[in-house]
Image: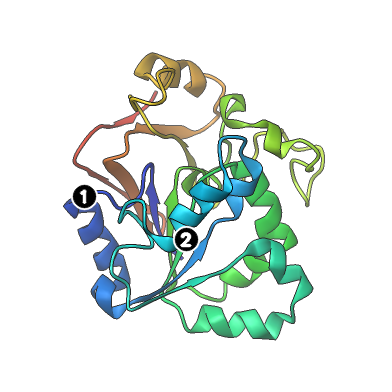
Amino acid sequence: MKLLLTSGGVKNGSIRTGLENLLGKTISESSALCIPTAQYGHPWCTPKTMWNFVSGQEAPHMTGLGWSSVGLLELLALPTMNKSRWLLWLEATDVLLVDGGDAVYLRHWLLASGLWEELQNFPDLVWVGVSAGSMVLTPRIGREFVTSGSKGLEASVEDPSAPADQTLGLVDFSLFPHLNHPDMPTNTLDAAQKWFQQIDNDAYALDDQSAVSVVNGERTVISEGTCIQLG
């Protein structure tokens, strides 16, 4: 897949242009499926925050960007359905909009739903993540980002002995999101540097005006704010 890993979504012109470059066409010509599943695992999330993401009414940073069509793909429902049905939905879409919440919870349901193993068959699909929706593709998220919503889930469906903060490892770097966010006073650069000490790979600390694009393993930083490679 082509990846756009954001902290806060598509919140400025540079990130929007980066997204359209990955799509190879305009947003208004593209169809999207949104995945809110990670929100169920995070204690800060509520029915209202989930509805705001799905409806695009709160801010036009994901589902409200002006897509030709937007649909809902709920991972918790997929195991109860015939796979051939939802595979048709993937074939008809250009981009997955994956919301934030709890990255370990999201990892669990990407694997348990069967979606993750099928995505390898869709190399032209674009994945746009917000916060945990981006972090889930990294090797590890760090203990600071493992929430109570992850408890009771095995760290890895494939390897139950894996570290509690292990995620999917599609990319070879980790992300510290929401740098210097006014509502998250602990998300400072000093905190990111301390977080980095437990991460055994490259990492970026990025604010909500920044993203990292990945195509064929090649990274490109897109930012109208702050994105710092740690180390």
Q: Give percent across and percent down for residue 50.
A: 52, 52
Callout 2 environment at 10 Å: few (<14), some (14 to 19), or many (20+)?
Answer: many
Q: Secondary structure at mark 2?
A: helix
Count of numbered badges drawn on the protein: 2
Q: Give percent across and percent down for residue 13.
A: 17, 54
Q: Give percent across and percent down for residue 208.
A: 32, 39
Q: Is residue 117 left or right of residue 90?
A: right
Mark yes or no: residue 217 visible.
yes
Tag shown at residue 54: 2
Residue 94 drawn above or below residue 231:
below
Question: Hey, which residue is sitting farthest front in the picture?
Answer: 48
Q: Quadrant of residue 215?
A: bottom left
Name the residue that disc number 1 marks. Answer: 12
Q: Is residue 2 left or right of residue 26?
A: right
Q: Give percent across and percent down for residue 164.
A: 71, 33
Residue at 61% in and 81% down: 87
Q: Quadrant of residue 95?
A: bottom left
Residue at 62% in and 35% down: 43
Q: Secondary structure at mark 1?
A: loop
Name the amino acid type tagged 2: Val
Residue 228 drawn above or below residue 49:
above
- Quadrant location, the C terminus: top left
Question: Which circle, 1 or 2, is nearer the viewer?
Answer: 2
Of residue 207 and residue 164, the one placed in the foreground of this image is: 207
Asked if labels 2 and 1 touch by Cβ distance under 8 angstroms, the answer is no
Q: Quadrant of residue 70?
A: bottom left
Callout 1 environment at 10 Å: few (<14), some (14 to 19), or many (20+)?
Answer: some
Mark yes or no: residue 168 visible.
no
Residue at 47% in and 84% down: 92
Q: What colour scheme has been applied to the protein in the rendered image?
A: rainbow
Residue 59 drawn above or below residue 68:
above
Q: Is residue 128 left or right of residue 224?
A: right
